[in-house]
């Protein structure tokens, strides 16, 4: 079944999480079609005043939503982001933030995911929404 722990782990092992996600220290801890979770360190991703950079929240959210959409898309298909937005409600200054990604819509050609990003105390810092277009993967 697509989305079970073993198959999901193999997908991540084969495809990785991307250069930017790796550079930002994003670690995937759960990966299924129904729920994808990752965490990211605040230190190393802050703006000059010491807050986690707003763009870092978006990178975490887009990484989660795109990976989940690609898992849903299945073999021979590719999900690509066509819209992403974020609402910041709290600033993180240390520790980690954790993104929890859940689907709003899982269609044949479009997916929509909501990603709630929380700090170490479980307080919502940001809500990200991403829409992905699913299309045939390019031929080699």
Image (cartoon, grey):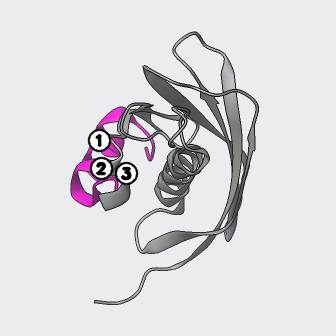
- Tag 3, which secondary structure? helix
- Tag 2, which secondary structure? helix
Toward the top, the furthest residue is 121
Picture layout, residue 125 above or below residue 19: above
Numbered label attached to residue 66: none
Q: Which residue is mark 3?
A: 21
Query: Which callout, 1 or 2, points at the residue further toward the start of the chain?
Result: 1
Residue 102, quarter of the rendered image: top right
Separation of disc 3 and disc 1 at Cα?
17 Å
Front-most of 129 and 86? Answer: 86
Numbered label attached to residue 22: 2
Instruction: Report if the CB atoms under discs 2 and 3 are less than 8 Å apart.
Output: yes
The percent position of residue 66, horizontal first and vertical second, equals: 53, 57
Is residue 2 magenta-colored?
Answer: yes
Dot 2 crowding, Cα within 10 Å, few <14, some 14–19, many 20+ = few
- Tag 1, which secondary structure? helix
Instruction: Report if the CB atoms under discs 1 and 2 are less than 8 Å apart.
Output: no
Dot 3 crowding, Cα within 10 Å, few <14, some 14–19, many 20+ = some
Front-most of 53 and 130? Answer: 53
Separation of disc 1 and disc 2 at Cα?
16 Å
Dot 1 crowding, Cα within 10 Å, few <14, some 14–19, many 20+ = some
Residue 121, quarter of the rendered image: top right
Separation of disc 2 and disc 3 at Cα?
4 Å
The percent position of residue 2, horizontal first and vertical second, equals: 44, 47
Callout count: 3
Q: Start and end of the magenta stretch? A: 1-18
Residue at 69% from the left image edge and 23% from the top image edge? 124
Picture layout, residue 64 above or below residue 109: above
Main SS of the magenta part reads helix
Numbered label attached to residue 9: 1
Is residue 80 magenta-colored?
Answer: no
The percent position of residue 110, horizontal first and vertical second, equals: 70, 66
């Amino acid at each position: 079944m697509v989305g079970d722990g073993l198959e999901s782990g193999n997908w991540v092992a084969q495809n990785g999480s991307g250069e930017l996600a790796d550079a930002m220290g994003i670690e995937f801890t759960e990966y299924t079609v129904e729920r994808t979770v990752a965490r990211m360190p605040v230190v190393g991703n802050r703006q000059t005043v010491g807050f986690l950079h707003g763009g870092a929240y978006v990178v975490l959210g887009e990484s989660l939503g795109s990976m989940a959409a690609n898992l849903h898309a299945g073999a021979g298909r590719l999900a690509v982001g066509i819209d992403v937005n974020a609402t910041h409600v709290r600033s993180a200054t240390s520790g980690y933030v954790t993104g929890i990604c859940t689907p709003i819509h899982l269609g044949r050609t479009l997916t929509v995911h909501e990603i709630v990003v929380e700090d170490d105390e479980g307080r919502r810092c940001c809500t990200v929404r991403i829409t992905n277009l699913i299309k045939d993967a390019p031929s080699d």
